[in-house]
Amino acid sequence: MTTFKAEPSGRQTDKLNLAQIVEIATGGEMPLRFRAYDGSTTGPADAPFGLNLTAPEGATYIVTAPGDLGMARAYVSGTLEAEGVHPADPYPLLKALGGVHFERPPARTLAQIVRSLGPDLIRPIAPPPQEHLPRWRRVAEGFRHSKARDAEVIHHHYDVSNTFYEYVLGPSMTYTCAVFESENQSLEDAQENKYRLVFEKLRLKPGDRLLDIGCGWGGMVRYAARRGVKAIGATLSKEQAEWAQKAITEEGLGDLAEVRHSDYRDVSETGFDAISSIGLTEHIGAANYPSYFRFLHDKLRVGGLLLNHSITRPHNRGRMKAGGFIDRYVFPDGELTGSGRLISEAQNVGFEVMHEENLRQHYALTLKAWCENLEEHWDSALSEVDEATARLWGLYMAGSRVGFETNGVQLHQILGVKLGEDQAPQVPLRPWWVA
Ligand SMILES: C[S@@+](CC[C@H](N)C(=O)[O-])C[C@H]1O[C@@H](n2cnc3c(N)ncnc32)[C@H](O)[C@@H]1O
């Protein structure tokens, strides 16, 4: 790779073309082919993947919102085209870009860039105009996670189209990390493994009562009901609840299973034998962890078990918000912390934490399978959602896969048990499930 020189043109007064600006932004280590509408090019000409900046609008997105937000806006607007990859799965391109250190250039170089782009490009610009990509209002901490705001945010992500999710997720309609016995196992089998693992960790048996919060399309609820467990699921997504109730009826599980369109905080029943929370914690915000775990503790009988399955950070320091385009377009208000923080918060309300398991490699495989599904059903998917939405989903799933592979994020299952006043042990001596 060539090494970037701070003054590629030799004189600070010279105007830079778009390729030179990209060279500066990537520290001279552009691993992809890059070409722009001004005719300039950079990066290795024989690289298998490339980026093509087709219009000034794309340049403006990139320069006015530095980092992944601007790139993502340009990409979903179609003014930054990826070459050599399918839009359902830009993973190879993102993986190559993952090695680039985007550095802020020195002030004089920045001034030169601004001069080069000119006032037309350095101007405020609305985000891509697609209606389905609302620009999320930033709200102050105290207003995030009100029931109304959470309902709005969940509606945005989950009520896209059940059919679109069927294409991406496959028949299990499970939108969380699967558990793979081998890299070649099918997604369907791996999702079944995950449900079995949760079911067994929770020591469920016929006649028990399970509460599944953030239940999605009801996969866990139906798995448990098929095995004689009375299961209630709660989801904030109306479309999910309708889909799940229909599936419950069609399978003849109506006596045992129920999925409600409801905030988990509105579940009034108590005395559950077990609670599963699979992919919900990411949505609730770290400030709410104490009330979240206290609520779940209150809902269990003594000896009842909680299985908390969620994306985590690999450490317990620093910022928790996803930031960038994920925060703006995919999971507004989502927050991640390390598993240590989740375990502490569960312990602080009285759970005895018995076990934790990190499944990060499994989430990378799950995301790979979702991208493959989207690619296979691309044309049909485009009759359900517009192309910008489909491209956005491909981008965020492939980017998340890179995140799990590079340990930017992890996935933890945490198992806790509610003790009685005497603090007596409530579970067998050794783990009772097959890993
Ligand atoms: C990533 S999905 C996981 C769905 C499901 N557990 C699965 O594994 O497929 C997250 C779920 O959390 C739900 N959710 C988020 N906030 C919620 C809340 N406050 N109350 C109830 N459900 C919520 C969403 O509606 C969605 O069903």
Image: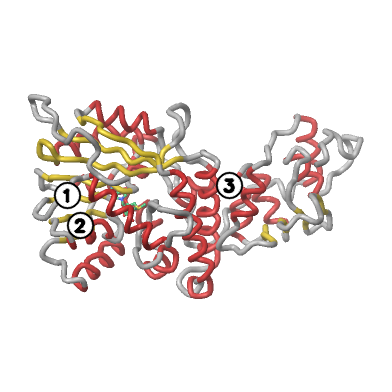
Q: Position of residue 241 (x, y in %)?
A: 26, 62
Per the rendering, the mark at residue 4 is none
Looking at the image, which residue is at 50% across and 47% down? Answer: 326
Could you say whether the residue bearing mark 3 is in a helix, strand or loop? helix
Q: Cβ(mark 3) to ligand 1 < 8 Å?
A: no
Q: Quadrant of residue 223?
A: bottom left
Residue that carries the numbered disc 2 in the rendered image: 224
Q: Is residue 292 visible?
A: no
Query: Vertically, is 184 above or below 309?
Result: below
Residue drawn at x 34%, y 64% as measured from the top left: 172
Q: Dot 2, how many residues are within 10 Å of its Cα: few (below 14), some (14-19), or many (20+)?
A: many
Going by the image, does 378 lie left or right of 302?
Answer: right
* 265 or 282: nearer the viewer: 282
Distance between the alpha carbons at the discs numbered 3 and 2: 40 Å
Mark before the other along the chain sequence, 3 or 1 = 3
Name the amino acid type tagged 3: Leu
Residue 69's disc is 3
Q: Position of residue 424 (x, y in %)?
A: 11, 27
User: Could you tell me which quadrant the N terminus lies in?
Assistant: top right
The residue mark sitting in front, 3 or 1, is: 1
Quarter of the image with the C terminus is top left
Q: Which residue is mark 1?
A: 204
Q: Nearer the viewer, residue 432 or 193?
A: 432
Task: Tell me, yes or no, if residue 413 can be seen here.
Answer: yes
Q: Are marks 3 and 1 in contact (CB under 8 Å)?
A: no
Q: Position of residue 290 (x, y in %)?
A: 26, 31
Residue beneath the point at 77% across and 56% down: 36
Q: Amino acid at mark 2?
A: Ala
User: Could you tell me residue 68's position as x and y percent?
Assistant: 60, 45
Residue at (51% x, 49% y) in the render = 400
Q: CA distance from mark 1 to mark 2?
A: 8 Å
Dot 1 and dot 2 residues touching (CB under 8 Å): yes
